Image: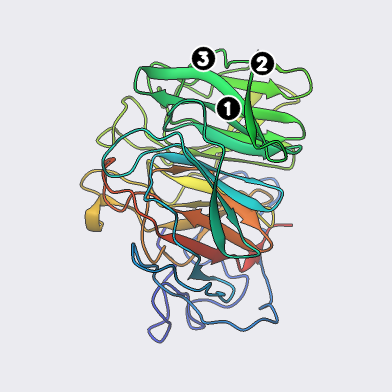
Amino acid sequence: MGRMPASPNAAPGTTGPSAEPPGAMAGSSASEGSELGPTPLVRIPEPGVPSSGSAAPSAGGEAPAAVEPEPGRYGVRALLLAPNSEMAVGELDGKVYVVGGYPASRVTQNTVQAFDPATNAWALVEPLPFGVHHPVVVGVQGRLYSLGGQTDAGDTARSLAYDPVANAWTDVAAMPTPRGAGAAAVIDDRIYVIAGRPPAGNAFEVYDISDDAWTVLSDLPQAFPERNHLAAAAAGGKVYAAGGRHSGANFQSPMTASLDIYDPATDTWQAGAPLPRPRGGVNGVLAFGCFHVWGGEGQGIGEPNDVFPDHDVYDPRSNVWISVADLPTPVHGVTGAAFVDGLIYIPGGGTSSGGSSGVTLFQVYRPDVTCE
């Protein structure tokens, strides 16, 4: 599938009016045998707010003023308090949290940064009781959960919950499989954790918040063993796992474009339409019912710094991907994101392949399509 072209007259990082009319599926393809048939994504009208269009974030210096992007374009928010990558991001009660990770020094962090979109400001909250990178983080029912990850001693199964009212972390039941570089998705009060760096393999487990208990589920399909650095989201009561690396632990490992779909009702997986191209180190989030997947890294991929600029959008109704405007600053090394009040928040990350390029930049994207 080809990349969606930008208009010659469009601002950098934007898709101009000559690219395709609203709802067009240029460069996209439906999987064979789709029962629903192609259902075009619906373009979202521009909000009634002033817009400055797209802007490429700075990696340092003074914090920029918030740039309100038009639909289908990128903007910026206040820089992180410290450079970071290989961390996890989650949303809770409208705030964006950056948990753990490490900067270019590769010194593992226990810091937790919290961003308030209402004030365009960051603050440090209670740190984790130990340093960790490559965890998964999600916000559910008034708590922020940090599950697993990697410490200086290796993979951990330790899992914690953060109470923003008490500003405190407490331990919850540990994962059955220690892991880092997995992905997570939430359905109701259950957190699904998918795969991870070797030796986690393609382990797939679910945490029930109300019972404080884990259940082992059917593994992610083994067509691509030892899957890690992938993206995940939940839509329509199903879990979607996209891309990632396999058969190895580092960015030189093979990559996959696979999209795998899990149905909790039957504890089974099925294949969906693959990503436009294989990518590892990707990130993603659900926005207006669409699964957005962006960024990533590899080796010899034909992109500057070996970091993918791609931003692709999947419609679960029609099993179709489209490609939207590239990231102004391509990044990798972030697991999880936040979708708040019509914006996707993409804080930090690495700008070169490997783990030594964490930055403070903070990009945002306003989706212009809906799958609802």
Please tell me which residue lies in front, 371 or 136.
136
Of callouts 1 and 2, the N-terminal one: 1
Say left or right for 229 vs 52: left
Of callouts 3 and 2, the N-terminal one: 3
Inspect the image, locate mark 3, and give the three-letter code of the amino acid beneath it: Thr
Whole-Å distance between the Cαs marked 3 and 2?
10 Å
Q: Could you tell me which residue is drawn at 72 percent across and 49 percent down?
A: 93
Residue under pointer 2: 214
The answer to whether residue 18 of the structure is visible from this angle is yes
**Farthest-out residue, bottom:** 9
Q: Residue 193 carries which label?
A: 1
Whole-Å distance between the Cαs marked 1 and 2?
10 Å
Is the residue marked by circle 3 packed among few (<14), some (14-19), or many (20+) residues within 10 Å?
A: many
Say left or right for 26 vs 253: right
Of callouts 1 and 3, the N-terminal one: 3
Q: Which mark is residue 7?
A: none
Is the residue marked by circle 2 packed among few (<14), some (14-19), or many (20+) residues within 10 Å?
A: some
Q: Could you tell me which residue is drawn at 64 percent across and 52 percent down?
A: 95
